[in-house]
Amino acid sequence: MPQKTVYFGRFISTPQPNELLIRTGAALVNRKDGRGTIEKMDWTVGSPQDAVHKYGIDTPVVTAKDNGFFFPGFIGECFHSYWDLRNRKSLTLWTRKMANGCLQTDTHIHASQYPNVGIFGKSTLLDWLTTYTFPLESSLGNPKSPMYRNATEPPDPLARAKTVYNRVISRTLANGTTTASYYATIHLDATNLLADIAFARGQRAYIGRVCMDRPETCPEYYRDESTEQTIAHTKASIEHCRSLDVSGELLAPIITPRFAPSCLPETLSQLGALAKAEDLRVQTHISENLSEISLVKQLFPDQTTYTDVYDHHELLTPRTILAHAVHLSQDEMRLIKQRKTKISHCPASNSALGSGFCPVRVMLDEGLEVGLGTDVSGGYSTSILDAVRNACMVSRHVGYVNGGDSRYNLGVAEGLWLATVGGAKVVGMQGRLGGFEEGMLWDVQEIVLDEVDPNGERGETEVDIFGWETWEDRVEKWVWNGDDRNVRRVWVGGRLVHERQ
Amino acid sequence: MPQKTVYFGRFISTPQPNELLIRTGAALVNRKDGRGTIEKMDWTVGSPQDAVHKYGIDTPVVTAKDNGFFFPGFIGECFHSYWDLRNRKSLTLWTRKMANGCLQTDTHIHASQYPNVGIFGKSTLLDWLTTYTFPLESSLGNPKSPMYRNATEPPDPLARAKTVYNRVISRTLANGTTTASYYATIHLDATNLLADIAFARGQRAYIGRVCMDRPETCPEYYRDESTEQTIAHTKASIEHCRSLDVSGELLAPIITPRFAPSCLPETLSQLGALAKAEDLRVQTHISENLSEISLVKQLFPDQTTYTDVYDHHELLTPRTILAHAVHLSQDEMRLIKQRKTKISHCPASNSALGSGFCPVRVMLDEGLEVGLGTDVSGGYSTSILDAVRNACMVSRHVGYVNGGDSRYNLGVAEGLWLATVGGAKVVGMQGRLGGFEEGMLWDVQEIVLDEVDPNGERGETEVDIFGWETWEDRVEKWVWNGDDRNVRRVWVGGRLVHERQ
């Protein structure tokens, strides 16, 4: 494979909230050390032929379709620790670069729950867990899972895990997610398999072996046996990820206490200590719905708030991603900000399960860093575009319940900014991953939009471009009706990881 | 074309709210008078071969795929008046039949606004109309429309209308909408063109020439000149529809005052009288958002409520479809019920524009008849499945703002029931159109769902069936992630009107 490639076409990104940047030119990507980064953005190049002329006949030129554009893919990695260890000089350089690209980041997704997308009835969080989620997750590792009760053949949980994990990675890549922060299950083998598959497929992924060991809140058929087991299995999962990718750049472990009610207090503390000792990322849930918050209050009477619970156990770190955060008090927001902890906003899930309306604007105004998550399968879709749609709609609901106050509204550009720059911040990758700037990794998706022919004949997708729309209009139409059919190609670190047939 | 056809496969419908009926068998459809109706449902037939054996080698057998099912299509017609005129005996017969099928009904869609799906920024209803909607609609008939300001070629509004109307009909058919109640524009030629296209394509359609003539609220470039012109053009549109289909069964006109603020009071009265004299359906908007309600109060100080305004002008009839109805008072609901007027719930639009949460459960409890509408392009999608998703999510929001009261929740079966039986009631077609019963028209869609192969290779759609799901689960997955790719074929009155390539 040649070391350099030129990508020519239209580039769209959201460097600022409310700013959609649209330019045509070329990106020269250099694939040294197996990692493709942007060596140079050249806005003077006007055609593929120009590119050949300028960069040499031996440099392949990849051209986006004229009715499409390059858009950054999704990331979910917090690199501060990595760069600290690897290259202090680079750290200073990278953190100084503002992430001005758009990377669609799936900062919160349960890979194991993928088969249940759309299956949640009229449940809300806590009964949803026991009715749908624990049975499904347990089936990826426990032949005695309730899901196998009526099985006609002997269960093969690992085979099931393989099918499920292959599919969810295919589906997320097809929807343009270049990096995902995954929750797997408690099972070590299946979690290691997720890591293997993600690494082989080339998606940038954080792999979280789920920790849950509190007997009162976890079913007998699905829980870690003790704090010792939780920590041992977590460590084994960490080792496995490191054996695949010691750099942690493409694949890395992430410490994953399911949520406070799921873990013994001692486990939470030890996980906090492990995250610190190993300099690892952490992910968990917070304040998703009101019943859950009451449960936390019952189980942790010594802490004032849900946020305090995590803080007390040293899990509130700059590398922690908290999913949901629908009902945080102002004090909680301030503490989260103080600790530089990040938020993953999961609007599809919050709406589908009736959890409430997350006031994203308030959190942004408080200075919190917010990205988007699909939260499959509280959320029904693997698509971050769908998350952007729902983020816009939920912001309208926040405005509506606040007397029609429009300042809460998020528009399309802002939704894409959250999904990209926001996500970059959430994973600590400002400047290293993110749009179309020198030094950034080439984690990118190529989007294509059909034009309607004058006879009005059927196009192949739900996005119909009539020809008179501006490119800003077209991006809006793409956000509201786009799907995987509009994602033509996806690259991670310069490697082509998905191509639509 | 042979007169009879047997359709064999799995049939799914929602005869009752919360009931998903799944059966395998055959439907014998007889296409007399060019209109295909179900002569018999035969649940004893176990295979296509059985069907041939039973119904004869010359009767074609159309088989749904094994990984799919027949589901009723969408309807939007109120047939009471038709049957009254045509066949009083039949009327008694038909009204006694309970609609127990599932027809997905798009009871509210602006065909002319299709190019703007997804384009609405952060606007709310009234500014959305002036910023996006009036310019677009006007461009389908007025060469001086603001949309042509920067045109590089001479405008050809009728050509534009043709392209737009062909596309929206293609798109709605592809999404399984067999009948749609359309708002066109004020322009007679373009509206007649919509009628021509719908009739040629075979979609069951109601064509509404939009009436708007109040100078204070309508832009100069887009309004009827006077009450006389409004009525004259409306009558001409009615005549044109009748010239295509005198029976009104496949294509019919529908009287369409845009909404109360758009029309002079005298116009509203004359439209009410015209609807009565011609025994026609009526469609309009009501109570979509709070600013609009205030506007109506200003413009109609003599009426107490928005509903009273329509009632006063004799527009509140059993054949009237009111879209939105987000903020009705209890008194208004009672009056609507008294008049037997119908409601078209448009959740995608209400969420996208921040209009509020329509309390569908309350309206159903009050005995109102409710169906679903896409409300393109307040709503961003032409898909009724998307409307079902949004209806479920909005019902969660209603529950949430009412202290987490779960009785407001709508689940998938109920959402589909609203989209089908609900829609049948809204258009007065109980027993004539609707699921799979003797005498019903064959307005049906064939749905297909991909099974994931054991290696987890990529399926072609966003719905992945792993094989262990029940059919109830599969329907839920279809609702939450289905799109036009899952709609393999669509029939209207037994005629194949869409087939996926």
Image: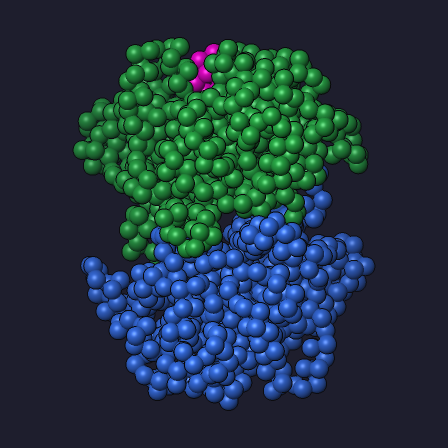
Chain colours: A green, B blue
Residue B401 shown left or right of residue B169 in the figure:
right
Q: Which residue, as the protein is rendered here, is positioned at the far bottom?
A: B277
Q: Residue at x 35, y 60 (%)?
A: B128
Tell me, yes or no, if residue B322 can be seen here.
yes
* In the depicted structure, whether residue A92 falls above or below residue B43: above
Q: Is residue A249 magenta?
A: yes
Residue B122 shown left or right of residue A185 in the figure:
left
User: Which span is picked out in magenta?
Assistant: A246-254
Where is residue B173? Give x, y as percent. 51, 60
Tell me, yes or no, if residue B449 can be seen here.
no
- Asked where in the image residue B361 lies, by quadrant, the reply is bottom right
* In the depicted structure, whether residue A154 falls above or below residue B412: above
Q: Which residue, as the protein is rendered here, is positioned at the far right?
A: B44
Q: Residue at x 48, y 42 (%)?
A: A358
Question: Count the marks: how many?
Answer: 0
Where is residue A325? Give x, y as percent. 50, 36
Q: Residue at x 32, y 24 (%)?
A: A431
* In the depicted structure, whether residue A123 falls above or below residue A52: below
Q: Is residue B170 magenta?
A: no
Where is residue B107? Give x, y as percent. 53, 67
Where is residue B489? Give x, y as percent. 58, 57
Is B216 or A293 nearer to us in this picture? A293
- Asked where in the image residue A294 lies, by quadrant, the reply is top right
Q: Residue at x 40, y 24 (%)?
A: A428
* In the depicted structure, whether residue B472 falls above or below residue A255: below
- Asked where in the image residue A160 lies, by quadrant, the reply is top right
Q: Quadrant of the N terminus of chain A?
A: top left
